[in-house]
Image (cartoon, rainbow, N blue to C red):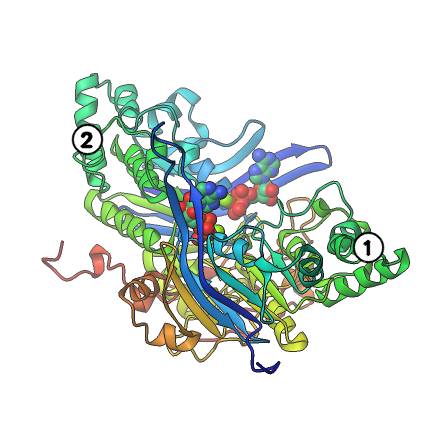
Amino acid sequence: MALLSIENLCVELEGPEGTYRLLDEVNLLLNKGQCLGLVGESGCGKSMTALAIMGLLPQGMRAHGSILVDGEDLLRAEEERLCQLRGRKMAMVFQEPMTALNPVVPIGRQVGEGLRLHLGLTRHESETRATQSLARVGLPVERFPLGLFPHQLSGGQRQRVVIAMALACGPDILVADEPTTALDVTVQAQILDLLAEIIDEFDMGLVLITHDLGVVAETTDTMAVMYAGRVVEDGPTDEVFRRMAHPYTRGLFAAMPSHSSDGAATRTPLSTIPGRVPDALSRPAGCPFVTRCGFATDVCHQSVPQMEALGHRHGAACFNIARGEVDQ
Amino acid sequence: MPAGSQPLLQVEDLVREYRLPRESLFAPPSRFRAVNGVSFSVEQGKSFGIVGESGCGKSTLARTVMGLEQPVSGRVLLEGRDISRLPARELRSLRRKFQMVFQDPYGSLDPRLKVERIVAEPLEVLLPNVSRSERRARVEETLNSVGLKPSDADRYPHEFSGGQRQRVAIARALITEPSLIVADEPVSALDVSVQAQVLNLIMDLQTRRGLTFLFISHDLSVVRHITDEVAVMYEGEILETGPTHRVFSDPQHSYTKSLISAVPYPDPRRSRRLRRAARPAGAR
Ligand SMILES: Nc1ncnc2c1ncn2[C@@H]1O[C@H](COP(=O)(O)OP(=O)(O)O)[C@@H](O)[C@H]1O
Ligand SMILES: Nc1ncnc2c1ncn2[C@@H]1O[C@H](COP(=O)(O)OP(=O)(O)O)[C@@H](O)[C@H]1O
Ligand SMILES: [Mg+2]
Ligand SMILES: [Mg+2]
């Protein structure tokens, strides 16, 4: 059984101008010891998916479908049950470490809080565990005493504290929403190394949200490309990169500045994806990508393409998969 | 020196310090050197990149080059003239020749003003005698040159997407027909698809108008793609500089090497981050 299985997840919000469908029939699968990457431009629904997994959707949003964690459907769980699960079953790391940290509480207390709350540990026990957690993320107590405040740490060190908080209660699933976007590239590499080690060591599942295809390629086992609230391509990361069946996946890849090792490609025009992601109320009829797609045909304007199997666990939602496809 | 052989921008041994909060009543407050003896020069029509991690002094360098902050020592020469030693009137007329574009397409545009006012603002300061109709014509022409519509002049910043706002910011920088644009992280807040549009515009302006760019970014791939020469900064100093393709393909300094090797490479077959499944038995 998969550790996390999301089936036909829809998230809707009633607005003055109608119903916004922020997530539309999202299907995702995550196994133990694996990392699932979610990519796509901003506004495609990545954070909304993360919040749904955490049972933290904002007030007023309706969700249907199912989010199964070890077989238990979070969408049917009471808030009380979700509180028990949060931290112990699934934990989250956000982009901006300062949003997750309280600036006036020492780091040791912040890491220990979940332990006292969830596991009922005493102050002393929770301090011992917090010390271990912080050491595991590369903040040994000799140099980083529990009494330090967040502002006394660098951005990368703060993100380590947030990861220690997330790990403290031994969750099975870690959801990391752009955990390195605010960090320097060398620090990003360290944090991604740390996350990869941790999921191996504790046999956890990691949902890694990023807009960087380089991060996806280097860190994930499977990936899903999201566009306008839908998954438009997913599969094993190496398969998706090899085929890039969906024009949106190819567009994202082609827009990246040169990364060739010979430096020959500099100063050539980059390919772009014209326009921008439509918001939930202005999505076109038919394929959500049709307004920006260079391969659109009549059918794309009329109906919504469904996920089509292309290989072992690899799929894409596009009517014109064969056309323009570059098999690398 | 004959014109033409002289670099458009010369930065010589530039030092910029910030005063730190006073720690003792009896000692003067200590100072922090954010830019510590930086020298480089940029030829007319070229794009010169500054890369480095956050806090290394890139933005401080940009502001000091723009004359927005005063250096402790060193010189900034534009077309051979030292901008910090010019009389106010001459500085004002030189000002139109160098303009700046900032990272944040939200924060850097006044939300209460229409795009026409925003884009025309540098004109009002530098050329107060331009007529209203001429001003409108120049705004429309400039909007056109950055891929916006003349009618966009009548809209407010919030009506634009992030990439379009950055085009507005670039239009504002272009309106005085400068020869140098200092761009501090101009695409860092944008999605990759929109970033590509803005980078193409910048490359196009350089080719078509012969504009010179000082392009500052923490993103190595972006700098590698669009600059001719690059300087790698660390703790206020330039560690390595040279033609971009050379610095990236054959970095000399160990810091440059570590920066380049940390950039994630978008090919799973070359993944550095070996996961358990792929790791040889016995490895931790
Ligand atoms: N609290 C909210 N209320 C209404 N709409 C929201 C809210 N948060 C996000 N959205 C909308 O939901 C969509 C998906 O957003 P999000 O999941 O944050 O995207 P991503 O993380 O991929 O950038 C966007 O169109 C966004 O405008
Ligand atoms: N106004 C200021 N007062 C004091 N220190 C400053 C000020 N502006 C920047 N600094 C410091 O100078 C250093 C360089 O900052 P900055 O130029 O913004 O770096 P970068 O743009 O490379 O991230 C940092 O350590 C920063 O904290
Ligand atoms: Mg998000
Ligand atoms: Mg800066």
* Residue A233 vertical placement versus A35 (above, below): below
Mark 1 belongs to chain: B
Q: Which image quarter is the N terminus of chain A in?
A: top left
**Residue pointed to by mark 1:** B128
Image quadrant in which you'd find residue B78: bottom right
- Which labelled disc corresponds to residue A131? 2
* Label 1 crowd (10 A; few <14 / some 14-19 / many >=20): few
SS of the residue under disc 2 = helix
* Residue B276 vertical placement versus A172 (above, below): below
SS of the residue under disc 1 = loop
Mark 2 belongs to chain: A
Residue placed most toward the observer, B186 or A272:
B186
| Residue A280 position within the rendered picture, expressed as x and y whole percent measured from the top left | 64, 45
**Picture mark count:** 2
Residue placed most toward the observer, A89 or B190:
B190
Q: Which image quarter is the C terminus of chain A in?
A: bottom left
The reply to whether residue A64 is in sight is yes
The residue lying at 72 percent from left, 67 percent from top is B177
The residue lying at 37 percent from left, 51 percent from top is A36
- How far apart marks 2 and 1 lie (CA) works out to 64 Å
Between label 2 and label 1, give the one nearer the viewer: 1
* Label 2 crowd (10 A; few <14 / some 14-19 / many >=20): many
| Residue B152 position within the rendered picture, expressed as x and y whole percent measured from the top left | 78, 55
Tell me the kind of residue under disc 2: Thr
Residue at the left extreme, as displayed: B282
* Residue A328 vertical placement versus B154 (above, below): below
The reply to whether the residue tagged 2 has its Cβ within 8 angstroms of ligand 2 is no
Tell me the kind of residue under disc 1: Pro
